């Protein structure tokens, strides 16, 4: 199983700042098959990024994904109040399709 | 509008069984693979199972392998997961999600809560 390690566990920032979230895999992720999801309390996850770099439909361009191999990054520029949530990465290239433990983005 | 509605959750004793259902609408269900993902209280997301549109490809998470069976009924636009020998650590909200493209989950249901307790 590919283990995904997300860092930091918690990120404290202010609205308007830039957030950089990391997802590191225990081995190379096939074909950049890496997604990012946002989850708010009491809600289902919401797809943000697929294929490591492709924004899902309706996702603002302040969200961007980058990386390849085993190192991936989600960047959120100009944080809005609605962006404070938990973010998960998932690899879907090799079963079981594992998730990271998440990064909680909280208001400073 | 794509909708996924899970049902079948509830309280079950350790060692018991439970069948979860996910009713899909708003898209050509038979063309899509489907996933089940769970989330224990206060914890992160965990892959449970997936089934391809053809049923040819079925995958399970390591923690549930051997205790769970995923199936689908295209006539009913539904996907199911039958869980056996339930353990305390199976307590979680179980989400179904549509698997799109190379395998990301683009639409999710609101989840159904399974509580395993004596």
Image (cartoon, coloured by chain):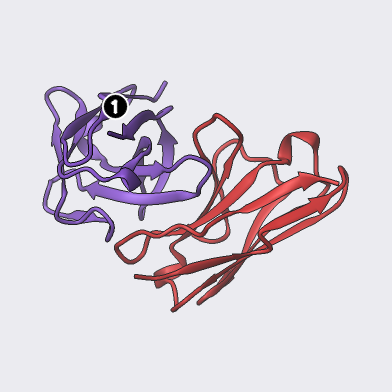
Chain colours: A red, B purple
Q: Where is residue B26 in the image (x, y as percent from the top left)?
A: 34, 22
B110 shown above or below A16: above
Work out whether residue B25 or residue A81 is closer to the camera in this orientation and state it. A81
Q: In this view, does A9 lie above or below B23?
A: below
Residue B113 in view? yes
Mark 1: few/some/many CA within 10 Å (<14, 14-19, 20+): some
Q: In this view, does B116 lie above or below B47?
A: above
Per the image, label 1 sits on a secondary structure element best described as strand
- Residue at the extreme front: B118
State how many labels appear.
Answer: 1
Which sits in the foreground, A38 or B87? B87
Left or right of B114 on screen, residue B20 = left
Residue, x 36% and y 53% (percent of image)? Answer: B103
Residue under label 1, please give it.
B11
x, y (%) of residue B8? 25, 24
B71 or B31, nearer to the observer: B71
Q: Nearer the viewer, residue B102 or B36?
A: B36
Q: Is B5 on the left or on the right of B69, as rendered?
A: right
For the N terminus of chain A, give its image quadrant. Answer: bottom left
Does any portion of residue B36 appear in the rendered image?
no
In the figure, is residue B73 to the left or right of B24? Answer: left
Please give the name of the residue rendered at 11% of the width and 52% of the height, measured from the top-left corner. Answer: B56
- The percent coordinates of residue B117 (x first, y second) are 31, 35
Identify which residue is drawn at 87% across, 46% down.
A14
Q: Mark 1 lies on which chain?
A: B
Q: Is residue A22 left or right of residue A13?
A: left
Instruction: Tell me where residue A54 appears, x and y as whole percent.
Output: 56, 54
Q: Identify the residue shown where x is 50% and y is 49%.
A: B44
């Amino acid at each position: 199983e590919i283990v995904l390690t997300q860092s930091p566990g918690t990120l404290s920032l202010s609205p308007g700042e830039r957030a950089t979230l990391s997802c590191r895999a225990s081995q190379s992720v096939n074909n950049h098959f890496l997604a990012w999801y946002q989850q708010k309390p009491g809600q289902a996850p919401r797809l943000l990024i697929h294929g490591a770099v492709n924004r899902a439909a309706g996702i603002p361009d302040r969200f961007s994904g980058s990386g390849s191999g085993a190192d991936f990054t989600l960047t959120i520029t100009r944080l809005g109040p609605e962006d404070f949530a938990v973010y998960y990465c998932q690899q879907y290239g090799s079963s079981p399709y594992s998730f990271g433990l998440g990064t909680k983005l909280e208001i400073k | 509008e794509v909708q996924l509605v899970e049902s079948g959750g509830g309280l079950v004793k350790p060692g018991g069984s439970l069948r979860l259902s996910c009713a899909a609408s708003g898209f050509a269900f038979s063309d899509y693979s489907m996933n089940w993902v769970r989330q224990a209280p206060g914890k992160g997301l965990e892959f449970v199972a997936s089934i391809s549109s053809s049923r040819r490809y079925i995958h399970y998470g390591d923690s549930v392998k051997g205790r769970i069976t995923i199936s689908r009924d295209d006539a009913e636009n539904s996907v199911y997961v039958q869980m056996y020998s339930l353990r305390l650590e199976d307590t979680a909200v179980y989400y179904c999600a549509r698997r799109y493209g190379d395998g990301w989950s683009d639409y999710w249901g609101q989840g159904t809560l399974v509580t395993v307790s004596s």
